[in-house]
Amino acid sequence: MKKYIQYTTLLFSLPMFIIGCCFSNIDVILLSVCFIFINNIIYSIQKFSERIIFFAFNISFFIFLIGRLCIKRLTSYEDVYNKFSQYGLDFADNDIALHIVIVLFISLLFLFLGYSLFKEKFDEKNKKPMRIKKINDNDRKKIATVSKLIFYLTYIFSVMVYIDKARYASAMGYEGLYASYSSSLPSFFTKISEMTAISLFVYLGTLPTKKKTIIPIIMYLILGVLSLLTGQRSNFVLNIMIVLVYLCLRNITDKDYKWFGKKEIIITVCLLPILIIVLNTVSYIRAGETQKQTSAVNIINDFIYKQGASVNLIGYAKTLDEQLPEGKNYTFGRIIDFVQENAVTQLFFDFPTYEPNTIDSARYGNSFADSVSYILSPARYVRGWGYGSSYIAELYKDFGYIGVIIGNFILGGILVLMSRIFRLGPIWAGFGLSMIRLLLYSPRDTATSFIVTSLSLINILTVVIILIGVMFLKFIESNKRISHQQEGKGASINYYTSL
């Protein structure tokens, strides 16, 4: 039944999109966007645990890029800063609004096509259930021991860093974190704190029992709560989402045990409105405003509308085309910066480096977020304000509609690949979870941030330390085995000598 409903919504969305384009009707195209989104959701629900990453990504896509348009058209939501746009956009030109909804439809359609085609191809090649490969239980237990220990040790530093940021944000304001924040802690405290997430992900990649994951996961969620004290909501939400994704992936690896079933789904659905209210409250507090909405429905509408500001970036990629720096590639900007600015490269080459939220970064760097924010409001930008970025806006700016088509098709394949990485062992699973967490944020983030951030030098160093720790445990185990063997031989010799 679900499959027939999915096919109906898919087939219904296509002619609606074509008709909307022929008559330049924004509402009709927006409706087709909603139908292709529903298609993606129903497709995900059919095999929820297997397609959890695709489901979570589409939810993120809706919140950051579609929800604002829908809330504005379906409700009487009033935006005091934008009273004249029918869609809650920053643009009065209907051609730009038309461009935005066209890009959204193309993105969702080819995201679905990429995911479904790659999923079918992978399923044909590998019909066995997901499980850890290329590692024996003894090594897996050692990796679990070392990674869990590192998580606990570095967790203390993470808490201290968040508390330090919270104090600064309380004194200087949320935007001050990006414009002038300098940690009062020793620099190595920050570096050690960056080892916390990857060490936890590697530990979770060893597939521990549910009982053994409870405390580490709760501690990780607490870090998300601490991030709220700094005014940063994204870490809180992403921490929750990656935990839910992990639980669903464990439904696949543990066929005989339900990690995320009906009970967990009901609890999640019940907690969702509360979480939205909390997030919305944080938004008002960091802006120094009083929350005006009172009913739960209005608060949820307010939250979705405000989170959807990133959809404007698709329009700015078109309207600011001539003002943005020439010769820049924003889609691969994070990779370019990583290659040029890392410590090893700087030893041999004199590539220029730019600090975030600086004029030089906006004018000469490869950050779409910095360049757009500076053009829109130079004064606010240097004080720490930023509009953020979106992988779709970057794809369109660099490669046009063809880039949006190919980019989303490839992204669909990447989402399939992320769940498959779980089969390759704890280390790969650790990097995979890190990438998934950042991929879920890509509708509001740069296109390649999930690669650069996950494969950062500190993450790689953490994994190396884990492997060294495993080798050390093996060395101790080997010495103990040899010692026991020698003691056994000595006892045998003494026995025969006594005879």
Image (cartoon, helix red, strand yellow):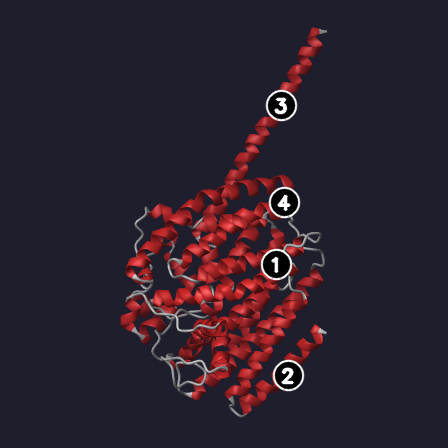
Identified by mark 3, the residue type is: His
N-terminal of the pair, mark 2 or mark 3, is: 2
Identified by mark 4, the residue type is: Ile
Identity of the residue drawn at 60% across and 79% down: 35
Residue pointed to by mark 1: 264
Which label sits in the foreground, 4 or 1? Answer: 1
- Residues under labels 4 and 1: Cα distance? 31 Å
Tell me where residue 159 appears, x and y as whole percent: 41, 49
- Residues under labels 2 and 3: Cα distance? 72 Å
Q: For the residue carrying disc 3, how many other residues have a C-alpha within 10 Å: few (<14), some (14-19), or many (20+)?
A: few
N-terminal of the pair, mark 4 or mark 3, is: 4
Indicate whether 129 appears above or below 388: above
Q: Can you name the residue that lies furthest to the left here?
A: 379
**Res. 167 image quadrant:** bottom left
Tell me where residue 122 appears, x and y as whole percent: 66, 62
Residue pointed to by mark 3: 484
Q: Do the numbered discs 2 and 1 sit on residues whose CB atoms are within 8 Å?
A: no
